[in-house]
Image: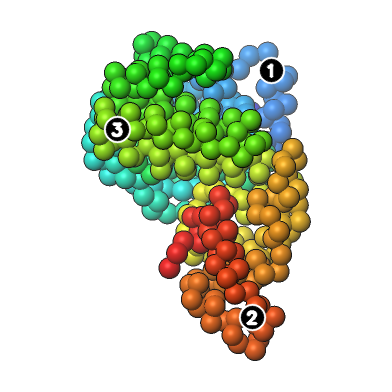
Amino acid sequence: MRIFQEFGALVESRWRHQNYNEQIFPGLAAAALTESNLPAQVDPWEIIRWVQRAGSLPDQKDVEGRFGNPPITLYAGPRFYVDVYFWLDGTTSIHQHAFTGAFQVLLGSSIHSRYSFTEEKLINEHFCTGEIKLEEVQLLQLNDVRLINPGRNFIHSLFHLDRPSATITVRTEHTPSSALQWDYRKPYLATNPFFRNQIMTKKLQTIGLLLGMKHPDADAMIGDMICASDFQTAYFALEAFFHAVKNNQMDSLFGLSTGNDRFQSLLARGKEAHGDLIDLVVPVFEEQVRQNDIVQRRSTITSDEHRFFLALLLNVPDREKILELVKQRYPETDPVEKILDWVEELSQTRVLGSKEGNALGIEGFDDDHIFVFEYLLRGKSLAEIRELTKQDEFQRFANLGDKLDTFVADLRNSPLFTTILLPN
């Protein structure tokens, strides 16, 4: 691994001559990565062999492996270090950094999304509300380099498309002026993921106990706690309750709505105590459900193309941008036709362990659905699709009638397509 020692020494020398100015470190690190062209010189699996054979390693900055599968420190300098992060199915949250640096794709590819956050209300130093907005989506491939700036100037997420993927990261220890590394929960919340509070933690643990044992007074006790708590604690209590009742297998088995009714009652109590802030939590939970649904489907899919498509649906809530990224990855094909092929194939694919008829989660998916999906994907409204069915070219769909409304609703309400097939 001498090449990483040489690379680290190069960065150290250049940065020292700049008096360790953190503002210029991202550009300096990115330039060094580009010049050194490490992916052309390093076999990622030689790094693994080196770790397995080594009698000693550089000071490992993440011994527990909290970020990466695994993370490996390749160079540890006095003010920065060089890591490689391997990823299997890993995906990062929307987050900002409390350090500076740059990263380069060593293996595989990723969807890189950049966001902005407009703060509306600072609840406390660890929790706030605002609006999260997607600013840019890029397809990162081998050798691509991106800067890491501290704080809210660089809010991003990476979704690793290939299994495995790996990135080289050159980074400082921390930047005092951006001490907090916030995580963002679309569409409205920001939280400090490293915040720990004993009282809040124990209160949340009691929710698991009450719901796990089906205590007859569980809802009333949890409601009392929410009303007596600060909004941050109330949010996490509602989140724990929401996901617990959402995943209630008995309710799902018999098609019962008792879990939703219980959550709505608890939400009403929360609103009495915390006012309009409570209105922000439901969209956050619904987005979590949508993301979890797609991640679960993707985890059982083996086709690289299908996994790429599901990753786009998970990360890119923009029809035109998805078409652009499909075209970038498959330049020789019409992106709409490519997506139609994927959708038809997924409609004939079963998800392991699921009771659903196909990987789309839409029962009875057939040629009529494909027709409707195609023209929704092409930006047509329901009225425009209805007019299409009157043309000779589409005569076989002329008898859709009221079913057309049902098909459009099924597609737009699907967790997979809800963000890209928005009403015109």
Q: Which of marks 1 and 2 is in front?
A: 2
- Please tell me which of labels 3 and 1 falls first in the chain: 1
Find disc 3 in the rendering and name its residue.
271
Residue 327 location, quadrant: bottom right
Find disc 2 in the rendering and name its residue.
398
> Regarding mark 2 in the picture, which secondary structure is present there?
loop
394 with respect to 420 (left or right): right
Q: Residue at x 58, y 27 (%)?
A: 71
24 with respect to 260 (left or right): left
- Could you say where residue 190 lies in the image, as x and y percent from the top left? 35, 34
Q: Which residue is drawn at 73% across and 26% down?
A: 49
Q: Judge the density around disc 2: few (<14), some (14-19), many (≥20) Cα neighbours within 10 Å.
A: some
207 with respect to 389 (left or right): left
Q: Which residue is drawn at 30% across and 26% down?
A: 231
Q: How far apart are marks 2 and 3 (CA)?
A: 48 Å
Find disc 1 in the rendering and name its residue.
54
Q: Closest to the observer: 378 or 242?
A: 242
- Please tell me which of labels 1 and 2 falls first in the chain: 1
Report the amino acid beneath label 2.
Ala
Report the amino acid beneath label 1.
Ala
Q: Closest to the observer: 237 or 258?
A: 258
Residue 202 vertical placement versus 265 (above, below): above
Q: Judge the density around disc 3: few (<14), some (14-19), many (≥20) Cα neighbours within 10 Å.
A: some
Q: Do the residues bearing badges 2 and 3 touch, measured as CB atoms within 8 Å? A: no
Residue 366 location, quadrant: bottom right
Q: How far apart are marks 1 and 2 (CA)?
A: 70 Å
